[in-house]
Image: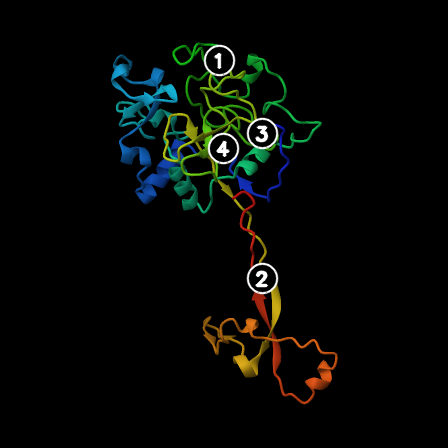
Amino acid sequence: DGGVTPPKVVHFDPVFLDEVLVTNKKYGKFVRATYYKTEAEQFGWSFVLSSFMQNVEKLEEHDTDPEAEHWVAVDGAYWREPEGPGSSYKYRENHPVVHVSHRDAAEYCLWLGKRIPGEWEWEGAARAGHYGPKNRTLFAWGEESELDVATKHANLWGEGEFPWENKAEDGWRGTSPIKTYPPNGYGFYDMTGNVWEWMRGGKHKSRIVRGGSYVDTLDGSFNHAATLGARSTLHGTTTTGNVGFRCAKAPSRRTEYHFKYHDEEEHGELAIEDQFGKKHTLPQKNWEDQFVVYEDEDEDEFNEGMDTKMKKRKVILPRSRRSNEL
């Protein structure tokens, strides 16, 4: 539902979705292979949660997000050094990569021949079949809203006062390794909590993120409520310590063909492809726009005696529908 009231029923085409979030280890392979430089590296800073800073005593010297005062702009913070200079991702290689912008995520997916998932696609996977009026659930694990139940299924903020007191009831103060918690009914991990996930679509100044993160609470007492409808928007260049992504890919579709008539006398012979793939005697472009179909009742008599060479040629049926989300 994405927070829409009342919920809206939508349809999306079949899609392949990664079962886990992209990790630091996988993103590192991409960077080494392509020499890619993230936007956080280009800007020279990224947002870090105030309680995770390396030098908390210098908090007042840093700028903060005007809409989220607990997120601090730390110079030198990026995916390799998540909390700024002096920190490292080395002991978190199986944690989801963070400090990546919408473009950084899209470039990685493109490198693999994939793309960022659409919002409808993501929620369809997150609900795992529980989207009807009779079996619809509030959370990924069901309707149980007790903290001791939630800590077994998602990485969320517990009962401590945000952002300085995190009791880590689920075992983690920040991000957690992939597959730490059980998957949902469709086999997808971390569809709620851990890190927000970039979605396809939206505008550059208002990109969509879904899923909630480790700073969100079960009841929404501070930050967002970690329900299946958790949704927010960020500027496309935003990089923080609680936003990651996963990739999707549309299945290959069968190429469909149809046949068109071709007048060889008027438009030349049909193209002949030799063993090397080279085509000879190509017909004129847009010949089909010049072809006239006679609808006269005496069509056979009218055309009787005309020495026309009408043949059919096999052409690919064009697809006009590219996406049902954009």
Q: Which mark is residue 4?
A: 3
Q: Are marks 3 and 4 in contact (CB under 8 Å)?
A: no
Mark nearer the N terminus (1 vs 2): 1
Q: Are circles 4 and 2 on residues that touch, CB within 8 Å? A: no
Is 306 on the left-hand or right-hand side of 38? right
- Distance of mark 2 from mark 3, alpha carbons? 37 Å
Label 2 SS:
loop
Q: Residue furthest bottom?
A: 305
Residue 322 x/y as whole percent: 53, 50
Horizontal arrangement in the rendering, residue 98 relative to residue 299 (left or right): left
Quarter location, residue 76:
top left
Image quadrant of residue 294?
bottom right
Disc 1: which residue: 158
Q: Residues within 10 Å of mark 3 (few under 14, many from 20)?
A: few
Considering only vertical position in the picture, is 189 above or below 51? below
Q: In the rendered structure, find residue 20 and report the number of the disc placed on it.
A: 4
Determine crowd level at label 4: few under 14, some 14-19, many 20+ residues with C-alpha closer than 10 A. Answer: some
Which one is earlier in the sequence, the residue at label 4 or at label 2?
Answer: 4
Q: CA distance from mark 3 to mark 4?
A: 26 Å
Left or right: 233 with respect to 185? left
Dot 4: element: loop
Q: Which residue is mark 2?
A: 317
